Image (spheres, rainbow, N blue to C red):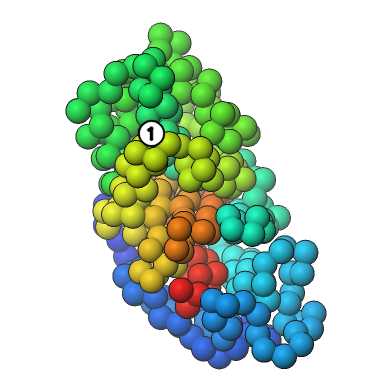
Amino acid sequence: MIQRVLRGVTAVAVLGLWLAGCGADPTTAATTGVPHHAVALPSAGAGGSASGSPGREDCPLPQSGFDCDFQRRLAAAQAYASTRPGTVGIVVRDRQTGAVWRNDHAGDMTWTASTIKLAMVVDLLRRHREHAITLSTHDRDQMAAMLHNSSDDAATSLWTKYGGADHMAFNRSFPRYGMTSLEPQRGYSKVFPYWGFQKCTADDLDRLINYVLVEVPGADRGFVLDHMRQVAANQQWGVWGAGPAAHPGNKDGWSEEDGGWVMNSVGFVGPGERYTLAIMNNLAGRGGYDEGRQTDTEIARLIFAGRF
């Protein structure tokens, strides 16, 4: 089937959700394109847990390694995701403390859609550094287009040019960037493997973005992060929902596949890109682009808005 990229964006109302035990300090995150209705955020600030001696109700995820405020936020995001169409895999990582929280769908195999373009850029930059290929100015422009507005034409051009005679050059490299579960899918295109028909997990995307932040050398990392922070309007959702104070950067992916729409987002949030967030949303025929966009953006808002 043919993937479809939607250029238009429709703002839709967010389903109201109140989580018992959370403070009543709603935080408004601008520029996400999603209204925030009746979703209470915890009142603790960036410093950590609420005052007093928090009990189990105040700290619902003690094994996560996150402070109590974050635990309440994660619980709120999980409760919200459980009300939404389809299934949502979520992985949140604190790169400073090493704390990681993943929900029960983080290991679900899901169509990557355009999130794989981030892995393609990482691979092209590595091969260029190692003198295996020589990237032209036009190649770099196409890489920028993949990150900025998720250009399918640019991805196909670079896949064709640098995929090798057997089209496997990218797929052979993807596991080294943490995408160890990724699998190309047969039967959807004349070229196999092809960037547009692959599946992975939210855990894979978590490992990918952390590879970018830790392993990619400075100049190349700067190229990637700068473009992720300045994405076009068609990617200002998902992780972007953390709000402008969080200085987020993301790579989104969206497509209508066998089984329905997928809406994915992976990126970083906070000073020094302290936190990473990976979301893979398989709507499974029970919702579409608008519902998925709303879900991903609200999850990021619930977890991060007001922390910075």
Residue with the mark numbered 1: 121
270 or 110, which lies in front?
270
Q: Is residue 118 left or right of residue 223?
A: right
Left/right of residue 71 with respect to residue 145 in the rendered view: right
Which residue is painted at 59% across and 65% down in the image? 81
Question: Mark 1 packing: few (<14 Cα in 10 Å), some, or many (20+)?
Answer: many
Task: Identify which residue is drawn at 29% across, 54% down.
Answer: 230
Above or below residue 227? Residue 158 is above
Which amino acid type corresponds to the residue marked 1 in the rendered image? Val
- Residue 70 visible in the shown view: yes
- Of residues 302 and 14, the one nearer the viewer is 302
Q: Position of residue 101 (x, y in %)?
A: 67, 58
Q: Secondary structure at mark 1?
A: helix
In-image side of 201 versus 5 (left or right): right
Which residue is painted at 48% across and 45% down in the image? 213
Quadrant of the snapshot with the N terminus: top left
Quarter of image, res 176: top right
Horizontal and vertical percent for residue 296? Answer: 48, 61
Position in image of residue 268 (x %, y %) = 46, 55
Residue at image position (67%, 72%) is: 67
